[in-house]
Amino acid sequence: LAKTTQPISMDSYEGQEVNITCSHNNIATNDYITWYQQFPSQGPRFIIQGYKTKVTNEVASLFIPADRKSSTLSLPRVSLSDTAVYYCLVAIYNQGGKLIFGQGTELSVKP
Amino acid sequence: EAGVVQSPRYKIIEKKQPVAFWCNPISGHNTLYWYRQNLGQGPELLIRYENEEAVDDSQLPKDRFSAERLKGVDSTLKIQPAELGDSAVYLCASSQLGAGGYNEQFFGPGTRLTVL
């Protein structure tokens, strides 16, 4: 059964760059890979979305290799307020384009 | 601009009782999603609507769960009867028309359900 896989947790320090990778096979050819951030007692919040290669916005970058079997969310110079759970969302081709969230990566940023 | 509104925020019921959750999406968003999120896990899609039509309900436990989106705006998710394993946060999200794989989803704060 196709699914997404992320590290369960990561630790970092303020000012460092953090890279979180999501592994996914058989994703839908024309669908985007999306990353969300979630704080306790809140719904997920959109961070970035991409289709291929590299996408950058004001808060993050998204790297997608040519084989599209994984994607990496890059957070430059994290701060304490970036402590949250990060989820990737993909559409899985061999499940009819079903939307599947990863299990989430709990990022802890320390002073 | 108002975000996705959900009510109630919290609900505690005894098993075998019915429960309903309500969602009002962002104005102009044609696509509406209901997710269930268990503690420590990612959201799991239960149903996705495009306007009034349920286009993906493959993960909705139809023996006890039902949903409706009359007039293509507000939506209600119902569980009858509730079981202990239904304790979770139920999230509603909306987006512009189109598959969720393409469009940014905007999530509400969720309803935390506890079944005793």
Image (cartoon, coloured by chain):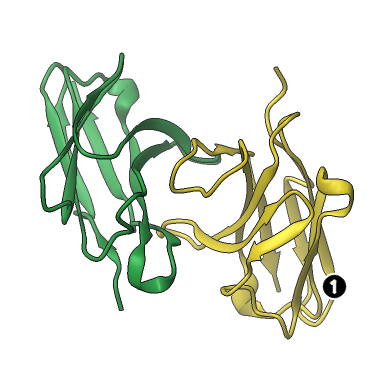
Chain colours: A green, B yellow
Tell me how many marks there are.
1
Where residue B111 sits: x, y (%)?
A: 68, 50
Q: Residue at x 76, y 79 (%)?
A: B15
Element type at mark 1:
loop
Is B85 rendered above or below residue A59?
A: below
Nearer-the-camera pick, A17 or B17:
A17
* Picture quadrant where residue B107 is located: top right
Where residue A104 sits: x, y (%)?
A: 32, 52
Nearer-the-camera pick, A109 or A91:
A91
Image quadrant holding the C terminus of chain A, namely: top left
Identify which amino acid the numbered label 1 is placed on: Pro
Q: Residue at x 65, y 79 (%)?
A: B61
Report whether B107 appears left or right of A102: right
Q: Residue at x 28, y 22 (%)?
A: A80
- Residue most extreme to the front: A30
Report whether B112 appears left or right of B103: right
Q: Residue at x 30, y 79 (%)?
A: A1
Nearer-the-camera pick, B95 or A31:
A31
Where residue B102 sits: x, y (%)?
A: 45, 42
**Residue marked by disc 1:** B18
* Picture quadrant where residue A50 is located: top left
Label 1 crowding class (10 Å Cα cut-off): few <14, some 14-19, many 20+?
some
